[in-house]
Amino acid sequence: MIIKVCGMTRAEDVEFCDALGIDLLGFIFHLESPRNVTQDWVSAQKPNRALKTGVFVRQGVEEIQAIAAKAGLDLLQLHGGHTVEQCLALGPERVIKTMWPERYPTVERLAADMLLFAPACRAILLDSGKSGGGHGKSLAPKDLQRLQCPHPWYLAGGLGPHNLTVMKTTGAAGFDLNSGVESAPGIKDHEKIRHALQLLRGKP
Ligand SMILES: O=C(O)c1ccccc1NCC(=O)[C@H](O)[C@H](O)COP(=O)(O)O
């Protein structure tokens, strides 16, 4: 199971999550987000084990490549209207493609679109709302339990200790934590992260 904590803005949170065994750390490159960070700051973050994941909403391929090189990113989360061709150009092995189930009339239509993107990304991230992220609202677990998709998909959207037990029943291969483990936007609550990890992996 992959666990990502998104919206890193403080070195102490990067160090805490890395030491705790979080797999992916999300760094948001989106001016409108309260969790927006700079390339220079991300470049200075050097986790031992966790992979640095850049989150992009509006940037195109060339800009993403330039930021990835400067900030030292391992993975690229495409969180806007990016196409299959853009994912392929950036390299499927390092792309996480965000999709929004609430845009689809049925879970079958969502699964069909996920299949189209599967060869172009290492995983698909399902987020709440119809665009953007950090909404703090969760998706309905009942719909996701019916989702048939052979490609790895991660679940996002308002996840935290309060709902992870039920959200685990969706069969997601990964879980993306953000506002549900914060005390304020961009300020991670270490006890909530510890508790979330315990619920997901059963570790102390
Ligand atoms: O978190 C943000 O501020 C954000 C803004 C714009 C685009 C993406 C953003 N976050 C990306 C993530 O991967 C979040 O973890 C995901 O949207 C879930 O957030 P939340 O609902 O707060 O758990």
Image: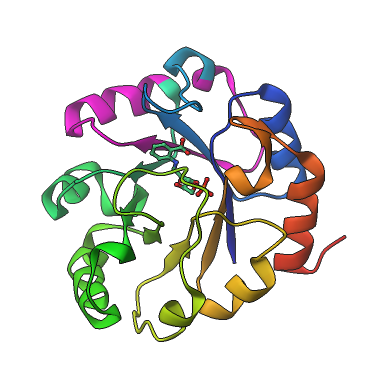
Q: Quadrant of residue 120?
A: bottom left
Vertical relation: 151 (above or below) 98: below
Q: Is residue 3 above or below residue 61?
A: below
Along the viewing direction, whichever of 77 and 166 lies nearer the viewer: 166
Residue 39 picture location, percent across and down: 43, 18
Q: Quadrant of residue 191?
A: top right
Q: Residue at x 19, y 46 (%)?
A: 82
- The figure's colour scheme reads rainbow
Residue 58: % across, % down: 23, 32
Residue 111 is at least partly visible in this image: yes
For image coordinates 33% across by 23% down, the residue present is 67
Question: Which quarter shows the C terminus?
Answer: bottom right
Residue 190 at x, y percent in the picture = 78, 40
Can the viewer see residue 171 in this picture? no
Q: Nearer the viewer, residue 58 or 121?
A: 58
Q: Is residue 50 magenta?
A: yes
- Identified at 30% across, 44% down, the residue is 78
In the image, which residues are magenta? 42-70
Does the segment drawn in magenta span residue 20?
no
Q: Nearer the viewer, residue 155 or 116?
A: 155
Q: Residue furthest right?
A: 204
Residue 79 spot, x, y in % from top left: 32, 44
The answer to whether 102 is drawn above or below residue 184 in the figure is below
Give left or right: position of 200 versus 93.
right
User: Which quarter of the rendering shows the N terminus?
Assistant: bottom right
